[in-house]
Amino acid sequence: MIIDIFSLFPDMFNGPFSDSLMARAQSKGLVKINIHDLRQFGEGERRTIDDRPYGGGVGMIMKVEPIERAINSVKSDDTHVILLTPQGKRFDQKMAMNLKEKKHLVFICGRYEGFDQRIHDHLVDEEISIGDYVMMGGELPAMVVVETTVRLLPGVITKAEATEKESFSDDSNELEHPQYTRPEDYKGHLVPKVLLSGDHKKIEAWKKSEAQAKTKRNRPDLISPDFDTQSEEE
Ligand SMILES: C[S@@+](CC[C@H](N)C(=O)[O-])C[C@H]1O[C@@H](n2cnc3c(N)ncnc32)[C@H](O)[C@@H]1O
């Protein structure tokens, strides 16, 4: 997979993409990530990227032509262009599973008051939000989407079942079951006996029922989509 990311703050990506599994995925050649300075596609001597909104209003809007030039500089027939915006579809594991099938992903990170609507309407294939809140820019959202997607690429996590049997990853709509490691006794809080029994059938049954109980407790909306977690908490 090839990933091209366009941002006004390309240095922000240095840390998160050069450590741990993200670094290994790149050094193993499983993904090639190119970070581009969006400013180089700006207009005039000052490389202008933004302008004032028609009709008035606060802040600056990202212009359409620089974004078009940026996309065209890397675009091929396999390209899938993603706009990071709080107005997009809320990102989830299923979307990451779809993205991992693409050969070439392009991410456009916004700043200021966001994008000229014609960018949303005519230049991108998908608009993604990482949640119902507004951040300062699209860089952290891009990192969230890229890391979640790259993690699913074959060979990035060496044990395939690690990504197959976890929260949000199968059709059961369940969170992963509770997990324990040593010590067996932490200040009187014991590891459930069944996990020490060696009886694999019983262990699997326990995992299933605990996963269901945890989902009901923490994320009832996964079981009944109409359930409103927020108002329940208020
Ligand atoms: C301050 S925000 C602009 C928000 C815009 N005025 C609005 O109300 O939708 C600047 C940029 O941050 C990014 N951004 C902020 N929150 C985001 C989110 N939840 N998901 C994805 N991108 C986000 C987008 O690229 C956005 O263009």
Image (cartoon, rainbow, N blue to C red):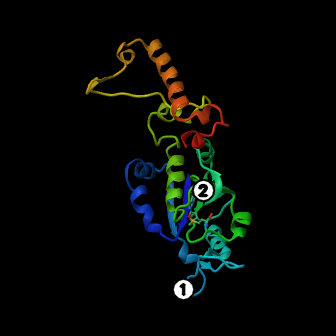
**Extreme residue in the bottom direction:** 45
Q: Who is closer to the viewer here, 58 or 209?
A: 58
* Apparent side of residue 3 relative to residue 179 in the rendered image (left or right): right
Q: Would you place residue 92 above or below residue 82 in this image? A: above
Q: Who is closer to the viewer here, 79 or 86?
A: 86
Can you give x and y, in whole percent of width and height, for residue 181 in the image?
Answer: 33, 28
Which numbered tag is attached to residue 129?
Answer: none
Tell me the quarter of the picture where residue 138 sits: bottom right
Q: Secondary structure at mark 2?
A: strand
In this view of the protein, can residue 42 be seen by the observer? Answer: yes
Q: Would you place residue 218 above or below residue 199 in this image? A: below
Q: Which residue is mark 2?
A: 105
Query: What amino acid type should be assigned to the residue bearing mark 2?
Result: Leu
Query: What amino acid type should be assigned to the residue bearing mark 1?
Result: Arg
Nearer the camera: disc 2 or disc 1: 1
The C terminus sits in image quarter: top right
Q: Secondary structure at mark 1?
A: loop
Q: Is mark 2 within 8 Å of ligand 1?
A: no
Can you give x and y, in whole percent of width and height, for residue 173 in the image?
Answer: 60, 32
Which numbered tag is attached to residue 46?
Answer: 1
Which residue does the image show at 38% across and 49% down from the upper left?
20
Q: CA distance from mark 2 to mark 1?
A: 28 Å
